[in-house]
Image (cartoon, helix red, strand yellow):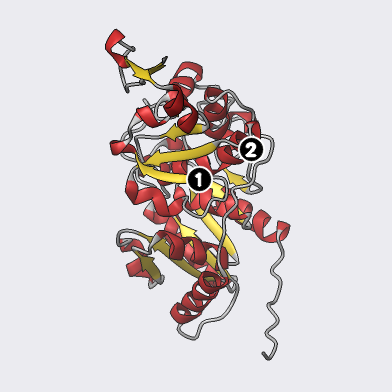
Amino acid sequence: MVKLLQKRRNRRPRTSDFKPLSIKRFNEIRNNILVIRNLGGIGDIIMHRYLFETLKKVDEDIKITFACPTEFHEFVNDHPYIDKLEDSTKIDYADYIISFDTTRCCLRTEYSTAPKVKMNRPDIWAQHCGIKIDNYDMYFDVTDENKKWGEDKIEEIRNGTYGPSILFSPLSVSMDRSFTNGQIRMIVKNLREMGYFVFGTHHLPVLVFEELGVPLLKKLPPKKWISVIDAADYVLTVDTGTFHIAGGLRKPMTAMFTWTDGKVRGNHYDFVLMQNHRDDGWICGPCWMPCKKSKGPYHPCCTELTEDMIMTSINKMLKKWPYQTKVITDA
């Protein structure tokens, strides 16, 4: 008999965790590897897509199961190196010889090395799994049907307006990583005057968008949301799920960061960073911690981003990726 350690979350193994395992059962599950994340977070789930190809290269016979909350499954169910998706609340560890829990390891690393965090989360998770990622490809599979849906949806909300499209995602789950309403108004005004079509996607109403008449696609299913991001000509975002999806899709993008370091969080993406950063003489950031200088929901690293700084970053993106006129041919 072979004894298998049944891993349990959030406590050290006990003697009772060792249960008899027959040779037959061992041979049945010997190639099963589990990667489990008990928390959500769209950006974190998206970044996990980097892990699975390198894990698969360890041994072509291994079968990879990724377990996370079910509401996030559609963000990863097209990944070619995931063999099975499971609900993280219903995992039976007896089905796996090896399991890697990525739920908290990145937070431990970030807290212990702040304010000078050097490792991005995918690399922290990879280190936890005993691998080093050798190909930073998320393997998004936007089908032709979904690609057309995204393009058609953007055309539908234009309402007769023209110009290259910019998907503007100004809000994060926390206000301290979001643009202020004043900054949003300024950005929309300037981009419209420059001839760009600005629209947004969000799971909740964005009141300042309603005030400005900015079209907003709300509560899109994951695959449709990804399709719209893929169909946009440019992406302007904060540190949120949109940032990681657009980065994985390699979209022309500029992103605003506040107290987390955009140079670390986005080190595997090609984008233009908008941030008050210590490397540019900013005295207190990125700090990776609650702000002691803030008197409200917004931090100085956000509120002290001037119009000139913001528009310089946006113009840098537009110059780096010149708009290519789309040629429509007859079928």
Q: Nearer the viewer, residue 48 or 238?
A: 48
Most foreground residue, 135 or 111: 135
Q: Residues within 10 Å of mark 1 (few under 14, many from 20)?
A: some
Would you place residue 284 above or below residue 46 in this image? Answer: above
User: Considering depth in this image, is 243 or 222 the residue closer to the camera?
Assistant: 222
Which quarter of the picture shows residue 205? bottom left
Residue 24 horizontal/vertical position (percent): 45, 27
Residue kind at label 2, given as amino acid type: Glu
Q: Where is residue 301 shown, x and y percent of the image?
A: 47, 37
Percent coordinates x, y for residue 2 in the rendering: 43, 15
Provide the residue designation for mark 1.
Answer: 83
Do we see residue 85 in this rendering? yes
Position of 162 with respect to 99 (left or right) is right
Look at the numbered discs 2 and 1 and tell me whether their residues touch, using CB distance below 8 Å. Answer: no
Figure disc tally: 2
Query: What residue would you read off at disc 2?
Result: 60
**Image quadrant in which you'd find residue 66:** top left
Q: Quadrant of residue 23?
A: top left
Q: Report the residue that reaches farthest toward the top.
A: 15
Q: Secondary structure at mark 1?
A: loop
Counting residues from the start of the chain, the first of labels 2 and 1 encountered is 2
Residue 224, percent from left and from top? 44, 65
